[in-house]
Image (spheres, coloured by chain):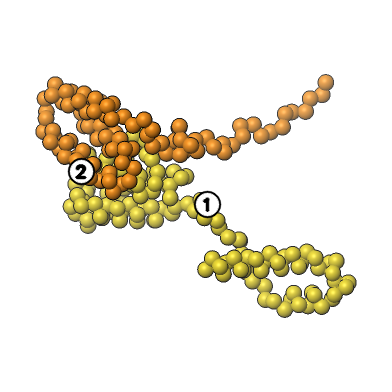
Chain colours: A yellow, B orange
Amino acid sequence: MIRAALFQSVRCASRSVVRTQLPASRAIAPCLSVSSTLYTRAPRHSGIRCYSAPAGLSKTEVEGRIMDLLKNFDKVKDASKLSSTSHFTSDLGLDSLDTVEVVMAIEEEFSIEIPDKEADSILSIDKAVNYILGQPDAH
Amino acid sequence: MTSKVAVCSLYRRSLKLALDWSVHRYIWRGQALYIRSLFEANKHVQEPRQQRALFEEAEALLERWKHPDPYIPPTAPGGSKYERNIPAPILDPPPHMTL
């Protein structure tokens, strides 16, 4: 897929080069303009996104990843109570040390480091989601 | 500070310290289980004096095992990427002066 995208963007770039040269070359080779109209115009491609570019996380993705993490956490007794707003201690039946472990697991999942002060305030799934969305280097 | 908050802080700091020493998570997990068992063993201690003794013991252990080069996340203060590419504070040109 990336090869196709690359090929398309290169083709776009080469066509724009031809288009800029057109006014000068028209007097010499009028057939050039004909050949350029032969191609159907491809939808404008915005180029390739580099791997280093920040992709940004959508809210549903963050939520889904945190839910999967909690689903696999064996101390969550009732997985049916998992929802986007469930509280770690009151809904999922985790104690305070389990909450610390969950926050550590969230750190591992998104490869970020949560400072101790913020880590204490993450007590439910929606708070965790909001915190992750506020972090630019979470991925 | 209630004892619950203190215990959570101690637990978190000990997990972090264990992670500093054993960089890989798969090594760390066993240590985390061991640390958890140590905390669980003193779960029912209610006496404040005993609690304080336990806290001091844990703090002494954390101090003794303090890592010389702990992991600091890149964008945190002290990290390798901290304050990299910060925006320039003043971008406007100075006002035109007529003397």
Residue B5 at least partly seen:
no
Query: According to the image, label 2 marks what residue?
Result: B33
- Residue A45 occupies which quadrant of the picture? bottom right
**Amino acid tagged 1:** Ser
What residue is rendered at 20% in x and 25% in y?
B57
Task: Characterize the local packing of mark 2: few (<14), some (14-19) or many (20 or more) Cα atoms within 10 angstroms.
Answer: few
SS type, badge 2:
helix
Residue at mark 2 to residue at mark 1: CA–CA distance: 36 Å
Residue B95 at least partly seen:
yes
Query: Is circle 2 on the same chain as circle 1?
Result: no
What residue is rendered at 22% in x and 45% in y?
B30
> Considering depth in this image, is B99 or B86 the residue closer to the camera?
B86
**Amino acid tagged 2:** Leu
Residue B77 appears left or right of B56 = right
Task: Characterize the local packing of mark 1: few (<14), some (14-19) or many (20 or more) Cα atoms within 10 angstroms.
Answer: few
Query: According to the image, label 1 marks what residue?
Result: A52
What residue is rendered at 69% in x and 76% in y?
A39
SS type, badge 1:
loop
Contact? badges 2 and 1 (CB < 8 Å) = no
- Residue A12 occupies which quadrant of the picture? bottom right
Q: Position of residue B73 (x, y in %)?
A: 42, 39
Q: Position of residue B60 (x, y in %)?
A: 24, 25
Q: Is residue A6 above or below residue A34?
A: above
What residue is rendered at 84% in x and 67% in y?
A23
Q: Position of residue B78 (x, y in %)?
A: 45, 32
Instruction: Output the chain of dot 1.
Output: A
Instruction: Output the chain of dot 2.
Output: B
Residue B43 appears left or right of A42 = left
Residue A33 appears left or right of B44 = right
> Considering depth in this image, is A137 or B31 the residue closer to the camera?
B31
Residue B78 is labelled as: none
Residue A45 appears left or right of B30 = right
